[in-house]
Image (spheres, rainbow, N blue to C red):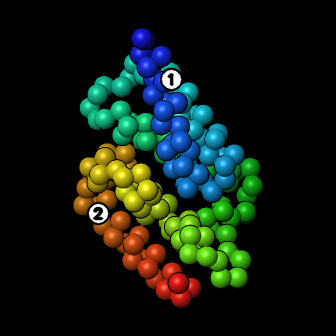
Amino acid sequence: MTERDWLTQRFAEDRGRLMALAYRMLGSRGDAEDAVQEAFLKLYRGIDGFAGNSSFCTWVFRILINACRDQQRKAQRQRPGVLPPQLAAPPSADPPLRVALERAVSALDERRRMVFVMFEVEGMRHSEIATVLDVSENTSRSLLFEARQQLKRMLAEKRL
């Protein structure tokens, strides 16, 4: 099996996790699919550049997050003045807990949301998150703590 065949197989296995992360970052299934596709193309073209200094998963997540950021910038250029979905005001009706939590997570700023999703949803360790986001492990821990505090506050305001 060649490196490219292995990459294609591995990417197919991890596609669900990657889509979930991209969707949580971008708030749109179409944008998430575009970002995951772009990440795969970058991985496929750059597999020879993988030095093995970090885990393959960490490398993939870093490329995906960069693709998501590119997608966000592209969307903002195409729709100037329109708020991204994570900043749009939610409807006034009190939603069930799951929907309220998803809205609260999407309302977090990008860095806190990424750390929260990678830690709580994807099960990544702080060392992996730090590598992906190019921050220290202590910064990762701090951002997670702040995200949890903000989520508690937001959910308490909804009285859930």
Residue 142 versus residue 92: which sits nearer the camera? 92
> Relative to 49, is 83 above or below?
below
The first of marks 2 and 1 along the sequence is: 1
Residue visible at 52% across and 67% down?
A: 105
**Is any part of residue 105 visible from this angle?**
yes
User: Residue 146: horizontal and vertical position, in percent?
Assistant: 37, 72
Counting other residues with Cα less than 10 Å from the Cα at mark 2, is it few (<14), some (14-19), or many (20 or more)?
Answer: some
Residue 46 versus residue 160: which sits nearer the camera? 160
Horizontal arrangement in the rendering, residue 8 relative to residue 38 (left or right): left
- Front label number (2 vs 1): 1
> Relative to 94, is 59 above or below?
above
Q: Which amino acid, mark 2?
A: Arg
Which residue lies under the disc numbered 2?
141
Residue 35 versus residue 124: which sits nearer the camera? 124
Residue visible at 53% across and 88% down?
A: 159
Outermost residue to the top: 1
Q: Tag count in the figure?
A: 2
> Relative to 96, is 102 above or below?
above
**Is any part of residue 111 visible from this angle?**
no
User: Residue 37: horizontal and vertical position, in percent?
Assistant: 60, 34
Which residue lies under the disc numbered 1?
8
Horizontal arrangement in the rendering, residue 157 relative to residue 31 (left or right): left
Q: Which amino acid, mark 1?
A: Thr
Counting other residues with Cα less than 10 Å from the Cα at mark 1, is it few (<14), some (14-19), or many (20 or more)?
Answer: some
User: Residue 54: horizontal and vertical position, in percent?
Assistant: 29, 35
SS of the residue under disc 2? helix
Residue visible at 69% across and 46% down?
A: 30
On the image, which quarter does residue 132 sit in? top left
**Are the two marked residues, 2 and 1, in contact with CB atoms closer than 8 angstroms?**
no
Looking at the figure, which quarter contains the N terminus?
A: top left
Residue visible at 43% across and 20% down?
A: 6
Q: CA distance from mark 2 to mark 1?
A: 33 Å
